[in-house]
Image (spheres, rainbow, N blue to C red):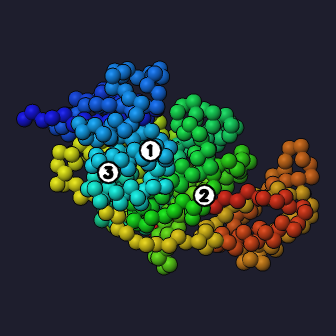
Amino acid sequence: MNQRALQIGLAGLGTVGTGVYETLCRNHDLLQARTGIPYAVKRVAVRDIHRHREVLIDSSLLTGDWHELVEDPEIDIIIELIGGTDEAYKLVKAALTAHKPVVTGNKALLAEYGSELFRLSAENSTPLYFEASCGGGIPIIQCLQNSLVCNHVRRITGIINGTSNYILSSMERKGVSYRDALSNAQLKGYAEADPTLDVNGWDAAHKALILAMLAYGTPLSPENIAVYGIDRVSPVDFHFARELGYNIKLLVVIRHHEDRDALELRVQPSFISRQHMLSNVYGVFNAIAVHGDIVGETIFYGRGAGKNPTASAVIGDVMLAMRDCRHPEFHSGFHPYTKQLPLLPLEDTVTPYYVRFHVSDTPGVIATIAAELAKFDIGISATMSRGLEGEEEACDLVFLLHACPWGRLCRALDGLKAHREIAPHPAVFRIEKLNEEA
Ligand code: HSE
């Protein structure tokens, strides 16, 4: 049977866009054989059509205006890889309104406009795919939507920012500085053009919002979640973490608390046991642990950023979109099991903690800290200390604390501000217990 080739419009020819274009060309026969559907890239929208590019592309395919993709009646599928939220929002909205399935990897767009765009997708019976928005090459979105569909998701914990994991790994393993590790991540194309969101935790938070939306159907607003980045992680904390049997990872925690019917969602650098698999996720790799009531614990691992892994995720979606175009009767969309879960207030979230105080080495300072913690009924499970080179009179004092609510810990730390022998702003990390049953 001679089928018409499906026509693809690609918006964005940056790192990932180039990987997508190259792979659609290079693995054309494989993809066509596996889907049974012929396709061609008809048009590519770029910001500057005159810019020199590494990729070999027929210049007649290029346009400087994405509207041409949406308005072209022959284009069946739109791939949005232009990034940002302004133009990308207009493009995705216009494409869905024009009944063209959209494939995007834009997590910031979904975090900000996801509810509206998914509603538009449903109203127009036009699918919106977003595998590449979370976990790079790991097919976590399709797993949550399809393979794990029978599960109530109890908990998702993961490392979902490749850049920050690369930086923390370099600091931990090679002892390089934060700045050098960040420059390397940029050179390798892992970090976003502006790496602020990578290192301040918000890239991971945007992805966490997408995972939470899939697992619980709860639309969450970015303003309400607790997000801390890796910029305050210091080499001395890696030293103590290692001594105590932990590693430090930027961790996303999404957990359903059945007793309160509330959702805990937070992003922060955390201490995790060196025995746990997530502790051994190094470099740009991501790993996401999903605990479902039927399947139990699962862990998904792979490259969380970079040109080809992300292109792999995008093209997986493009192939689904092609099947939908050929067989729209089978597309019913994914309907999240909507639960209007409130967020658990941050101050009620409970973990054990690592707290490092920088103190004057005076008699009684440990007792002062212990007494203030005891006032708030916070128990101590271990202490360590280390003198500081060049600072005879000062030292670092580390306390491992039993689990207590975050709000209570904050009040105890506030109480210690009055003591001049204790420097303000101790380093505080949560210790995540990853092996407990959900
Ligand atoms: N900058 C992102 C990361 C890329 O480092 O994980 C993939 O979203």
Q: Residue 231: give x, y in percent of width and height.
A: 68, 47
Q: Amino acid at mark 1?
A: Ala
Quarter of the image where one finds residue 339: bottom left
Q: Could you classify mark 2 by the number of other residues whose Cα lies within 10 Å: few (under 14), some (14-19), or many (20 or more)?
A: some
Residue 227 marker: 2
Q: Is residue 63 left or right of residue 180?
A: left
Q: Amino acid at mark 3?
A: Thr
Point out the tag, 2 or 3, that comes first from the N-terminus: 3
Closer to the eye: label 1 or 3: 3
Identity of the residue drawn at 54% across and 49% down = 203
Identity of the residue drawn at 84% across and 50% down = 387
For mark 2, give the secondary structure: strand
Residue 430 drawn above or below residue 349? above
For mark 1, give the secondary structure: helix
Q: Residue 225: give x, y in percent of width and height.
A: 57, 63
Residue 260 drawn above or below residue 398? below
Residue 114 drawn above or below residue 282? below
Residue 88 marker: 1
Disc 2 CB within 8 Å of nearest ligand 1 atom? no
Badge 1 vs badge 2, beta-carbon distance below 8 Å: no
Residue 97 marker: 3
Distance (Cα) linking label 2 and label 3:
34 Å
Distance (Cα) linking label 1 and label 2:
25 Å
Q: Nearer the viewer, residue 335 or 251?
A: 335
Residue found at the very far left of the displayed protein:
1
Q: In the rendered image, which quarter contains the N terminus?
A: top left
Q: Amino acid at mark 2?
A: Val
Q: Is residue 50 left or right of residue 57?
A: right
Q: How many marks?
A: 3
Identity of the residue drawn at 46% across and 21% down = 50
Residue 57 visible, this angle: yes
